[in-house]
Amino acid sequence: MGQLLSAARERMARAAEKLELAAETVDRLDYPAETLAFSIPLRRDDGSLKQLKGWRCRYNSTLGPTKGGIRFHPSVSEDEVQTLAFLMTMKCALMGLPFGGGKGGVSVDAGDLSLMEKERVARGYVRAAARILSPDRDVPAPDVATGTQEMAWMVDEYGQIAGGIAPHAFTGKPVALGGIEGRTPATGRGGLIALEAVREQLGLEGKDSLTIALQGFGNAGSWFARAASEAGHTIVAVSDSSGMVSNDDGLDVEALVKAKKDGGSVTDYGDGDTSDDGIAIIEAECDVLVLAALGGVIADADDVKKLSCKAIVEIANRPVLPAADEPLREAGIDVVPDILANGGGVTISHAEWVQGRTGLDWDAEEVDDYLEEKMESAAGEVRDLMDEQGLDMRTAAYGVALKRLCAAISATGTADDFAG
Ligand code: NAD
């Protein structure tokens, strides 16, 4: 088993031990159900051929079809895909959705591809993974460096292979192709709902307006910034892969969106201090540090020493690694864990899947209501378990997920039932 997966499972084991869950049911979550590894031959625009590595993992499908994004990034590996599929298993269970956990990815630098090359990679991915994809088996969505455009190519390719239109085979599609209003903002908006719901647990209940530093200004991060700014919070620093911009008086989020769109980076914003180091944002003085870029940003005790925040919100998947858990606890910095904080994306993917399955469209208000209800309900369950068992927020979030998963796993019988 890979190191990333092994480290991620330690958090599950900690929660299982605290809640005294039956070992037999937790053991069933130890390994992925299946992982398909494949190559995607990419014909480049200059005529040359490049072989890309790709994976799709279905980690566990006890609660329903596996669900999870497809990532295009040079750091993608089998271990990372399996770890992210494990996290999706926990997240879908925590959010109370009828989905298991899956994930996929291609080891490629999307910034190095032309639009037509991206289309070839997206369609090549579906051809290679088609044997495990299906609307009732494994349902992908966007992730890092993929979005509505890639999902449009993918669902089209899937329909050609399956011999019919299957809008619920992919989520995060353009609205014109059976997507749902509000899917793109859902992860960021949901992150803010989660933050507000656990403010007391974070010790931030006294302040109307929080100061926020945000790493990553893509799909998830930019929508979190919009929602936070609309709610009256002050965004004091933002970074992307090109660098960071900060201003203690606050940054104008719509101007940041425009700077990113026009110049390619938030560093083109123009009014504030800039630096070319996107990682240095973790040192920014703020109430809440929101991590919405990649994994492994706060890796250990040395990283924790650099922090000047009171709390962390994990919008990205696994930005805080297990080796930093104890140092964070000692430093009194609480973390809203990824499986709760970014659960809004898969929640609205569920609404999109239901829409595709039934043929009945949801309107924007229904989508917003569903997001709010699901985020508040999951955060409420986490709060209750924290209080009942004296747990930190991440362990409680795993606990809520595990209770649901273990109840479903044990419904087909455990040693207690079969031992006579
Ligand atoms: P994205 O590709 O749209 O954005 C990623 C952002 O991170 C970009 O702004 C990029 O410039 C920035 N970035 C990359 N390296 C950086 C660095 N070293 N320093 C600072 N910024 C850096 O991706 P996304 O969809 O917004 O996803 C971001 C994270 O959120 C990922 O971990 C993803 O798995 C997670 N997530 C996303 C969704 C979703 O619906 N989009 C749902 C759940 C979880």
Image (cartoon, grey):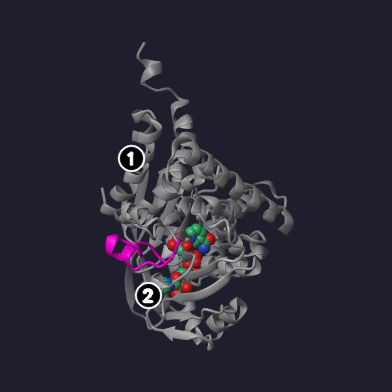
Q: Which class describes the residues within 10 Å of circle 2: few (<14), some (14-19), or many (20+)?
A: some
Above-or-below relation of 194 to 249: above
Name the residue rendered at 55%, 47% in the picture: 379
Q: Tell me the tag on residue 280.
A: 2
The one of 116 and 103 positioned closer to us in this rendering: 103
Does the magenta run of residues contain 308? yes
Residue range in magenta is 294-310
Q: Say which element carries label 2.
A: helix
Is 232 situated left or right of 217 in this image?
Answer: right
Q: Say which element carries label 1.
A: loop
User: Percent from the top left, x then y, of residue 161?
Assistant: 51, 56
Above-or-below relation of 218 to 356: below
* Quarter residue 252 falls in: bottom right
Q: Tell me the tag on residue 30.
A: 1
The one of 112 and 281 positioned closer to us in this rendering: 281
Residue at the extreme top of the image, as rendered: 420
Above-or-below relation of 112 to 354: below
Give the main secondary structure of the magenta stretch.
loop
Label 1, label 2: how far apart the Cα atoms are: 35 Å
Q: Amino acid at mark 2?
A: Ala
Above-or-below relation of 171 to 293: above
Name the residue rendered at 37%, 58% in the picture: 320
User: Percent from the top left, x then y, of residue 405?
Assistant: 46, 36
Q: Amino acid at mark 1?
A: Asp
